[in-house]
Image (cartoon, rainbow, N blue to C red):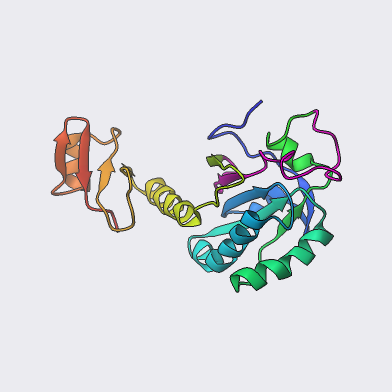
Amino acid sequence: MSLRINDVAPDFTAETTQGPVHFHEWIGNNWVVLFSHPKDFTPVCTTELGAVAGLEKQFADRGAKVIGLSVDPVESHEEWAQDIQDVSGHKVNYPIIGDPKLKVAKLYDMLPADAGDSAYGRTPAHNAPVRTVFVIGPDKRIKLTLAYPMTTGRNFDEIIRVLDSMLLTSQHKVATPADWKQGDDVIITGAVSDEEAKTAFPGYKTLKPYLRTTEQPR
């Protein structure tokens, strides 16, 4: 069964470059970005892991932890980390899950059940679906899923933008419009009546009866 938004993120225990992780316990009360890779020492993935290393403080400032996954053993990840630093200039300080038996990839529906139980002998093409991003909330539920082709590097600035939106909308009765970024106007949700909006969002604008905008709450 495929994973959907608001499903509980499957729990697991796995070895990582920072020791064993019990996933739900590791999440704690944080937001989490889990992003996966089909193989170590692949070109696009090398740039992606380096990009995240450079953005790790921005994720942390938002109360978000990042964790990578690649369908290779931890020992291989540790060797790969030097290449990532050489290419990006950023040291990888976040954990990378080793998944040589494909358990997490299958658990998160990135590979079919009949994919076997070993990463050995599998090429990146065999593991092509293992290029997914999951954003998971402190309630351990999936808030976002994105899947990318192997030839297209992921835009992690977009992941940060989405996190900003989700943090804002979890605290206020608003939604964010297309291409929203920090400081832009937001949409008042339908859960707020016009009378309530006058108090909660003074000076709001009505573009359509169902579309009311206001300044971003601070």
Quarter of the image containing the N terminus? top right
* x and y percentages locating residue 28 in the rendered image: 63, 54
Q: Residue at x 71, y 41 (%)?
A: 125
* x and y percentages locating residue 165 in the rendered image: 39, 49
Q: Quadrant of residue 29?
A: bottom right
Q: Which residue is drawn at 84% across and 61% down?
A: 75
* x and y percentages locating residue 53 in the rendered image: 59, 66
Above or below, comparing residue 65 to residue 174 in the picture: below
Q: Residue at x 43, y 48 (%)?
A: 166
Residue 92 appears in view? no
Q: Is residue 131 located in the magenta-colored stretch of the structure? A: yes
Of the pair 126 and 66, the residue shown nearer to us: 126
Q: In which quarter of the image is residue 101?
A: top right
* x and y percentages locating residue 63 in the rendered image: 52, 60
Query: What residue range appears in magenta?
Result: 114-141
Residue 102 appears in view? yes
Specify whether 197 is left or right of 33: left
Q: Is residue 93 located in the magenta-colored stretch of the structure? A: no
Quarter of the image containing the C terminus? bottom left
Q: In which quarter of the image is residue 130?
A: top right
Specify whether 26 is left or right of 14: left
Above or below, comparing residue 185 to residue 107 in the picture: below
Of the pair 152 and 74, the residue shown nearer to us: 152
Of the pair 79 and 43, the residue shown nearer to us: 43
**Magenta span main SS:** loop
